[in-house]
Image (spheres, helix red, strand yellow):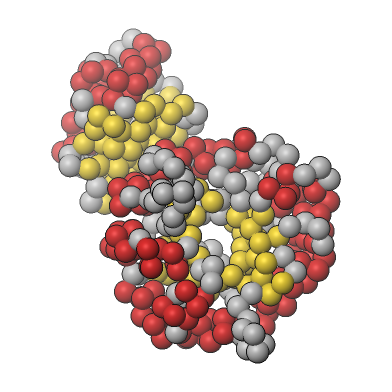
């Protein structure tokens, strides 16, 4: 089982609708959430248990699951006692009847020799749990070379990085770069990002940030996103909660990985013009005038072209000029397949010997995000 749609992490359930199971369910359904990830342990200490030993997490899990909401658990791990941490994760997941486990690991695992601790923990939970397991850690692996990525991901089913654009407001750009780096890791797994919905040092995510994050995830064809954390967002960031709740997750999704298509080597025309904007885009492309193509982009648009990231229309125009100069004389782009869903465009294309697939997100008639794969 993987995840689909929008979700939220909880840190302290009593901070979520005062811990009332019915209220949590009502808020979840009103926001269109498909999954909730509850904290079940911090290292070797169980979470969600009151002073008298009562497991208040169990009541919330039952309420949500009976209504069809997927409930996973998450545990922060330190690596000092991986066997006991793993045993606790197995126990809590089983006794709560959870549908998945998220393993949250951070700076403690950047210490020397922690690869063996990661291996012990992951092999233990993998052997003890038949449910999906996801890794939650740093958003940019390239900045954390000492973290044992391979040891964790080997036994995981999903990668759920913490794409927290803290103190910045470029959520979509950071999401795109995070996915690029995570996909390049050994033992890379399907990517489901966690976005920021909390306060930090006077900073908070804007409504535009959150919309950009979700639009970018949609454009990348990701099956799901989630946010951290429910309690802070509901209590202190009502506009952020409203933005997440109001975002309609696409059904069906485009899939986590693009599928390469077969193309006719002789076709040289759009076949057929499915959408007026797409027709204009192809016509502009075939002029080989970089300024004419880039005029279709928003001034602050982001373009990810193979392994390069262009930010802003000037950079995008420069990129197109370079690409056009590399094409054989007389070659024409054709578009054998395309999908249009409101402001989301996905189409395959071929020009000369080059084939590719592009996913574009539109806003106010302009392209705001272009993610292009070259095969």
The residue closer to the viewer here, 73 or 154, is 73
On screen, 321 above or below 125?
above
- Image point (32%, 27%), residue name: 312
- Image point (35%, 47%), residue name: 209
- Image point (60%, 78%), residue name: 48
On screen, 247 above or below 293?
below
In-image side of 87 versus 210 (left or right): right
The residue closer to the viewer here, 136 or 219, is 136
The residue closer to the viewer here, 178 or 157, is 178
Residue 283 falls in which quadrant of the image? Answer: top left
In-image side of 53 versus 176 (left or right): right
On screen, 318 above or below 199?
above
Residue 329 falls in which quadrant of the image? Answer: top left
The extreme front residue here reads: 202
Measured as percent of width and height from the top left, residue 173 is found at: 42, 38
Measured as percent of width and height from the top left, residue 81 is found at: 82, 62
Res 190 visible: no
Measured as percent of width and height from the top left, residue 44 is found at: 75, 69
Res 307 visible: yes
In-image side of 41 versus 71 (left or right): right
- State the count of labels: 0
Residue 58 falls in which quadrant of the image? Answer: bottom right
Looking at the rendered image, the quarter that the N terminus falls into is bottom right
- Image point (36%, 11%), residue name: 325
Measured as percent of width and height from the top left, residue 147 is found at: 71, 43
């Amino acid at each position: 089982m993987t995840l689909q749609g929008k979700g939220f992490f909880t840190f302290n359930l009593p901070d979520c609708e005062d811990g009332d199971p019915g209220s949590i369910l009502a808020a979840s359904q009103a926001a269109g959430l498909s999954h909730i990830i509850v904290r079940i342990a911090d290292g070797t200490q169980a979470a969600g248990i009151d002073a008298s030993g009562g497991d208040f997490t169990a009541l919330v899990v039952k309420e949500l699951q009976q209504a069809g909401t997927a409930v996973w658990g998450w545990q922060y791990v330190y690596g000092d006692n991986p066997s006991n941490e793993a045993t606790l994760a197995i126990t809590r997941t089983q006794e709560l009847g959870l549908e998945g486990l998220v393993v949250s690991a951070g700076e403690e695992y950047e210490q020397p020799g922690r690869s063996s601790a990661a291996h012990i923990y992951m092999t233990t939970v993998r052997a003890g749990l038949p449910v999906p397991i996801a890794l939650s850690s740093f958003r940019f692996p390239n900045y954390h070379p000492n973290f044992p990525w391979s040891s964790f991901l080997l036994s995981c089913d999903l990668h759920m990085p913490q794409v927290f654009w803290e103190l910045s407001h470029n959520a979509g750009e950071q999401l795109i770069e995070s996915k690029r780096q995570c996909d390049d890791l050994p033992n890379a797994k399907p990517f489901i990002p966690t976005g920021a919905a909390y306060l930090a040092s006077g900073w908070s995510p804007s409504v535009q940030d959150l919309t950009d994050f979700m639009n970018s995830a949609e454009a990348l064809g990701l099956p799901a996103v989630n946010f951290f954390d429910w309690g802070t967002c509901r209590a202190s960031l009502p506009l952020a909660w409203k933005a997440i709740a109001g975002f309609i997750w696409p059904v069906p999704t485009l899939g986590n990985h693009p599928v390469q298509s077969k193309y006719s080597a002789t076709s040289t025309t759009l076949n057929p013009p499915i959408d007026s904007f797409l027709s204009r885009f192809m016509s502009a492309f075939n002029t080989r005038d970089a300024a004419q193509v880039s005029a279709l982009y928003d001034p602050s648009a982001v373009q990810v072209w193979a392994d390069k990231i262009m930010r802003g229309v000037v950079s995008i125009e420069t990129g197109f000029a370079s690409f056009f100069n590399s094409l054989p004389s007389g070659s024409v782009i054709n578009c054998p397949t395309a999908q249009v869903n409101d402001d989301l465009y996905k189409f395959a294309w071929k020009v000369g010997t080059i084939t590719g697939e592009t996913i574009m997100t539109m806003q106010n008639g302009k392209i705001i995000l272009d993610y292009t794969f070259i095969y």
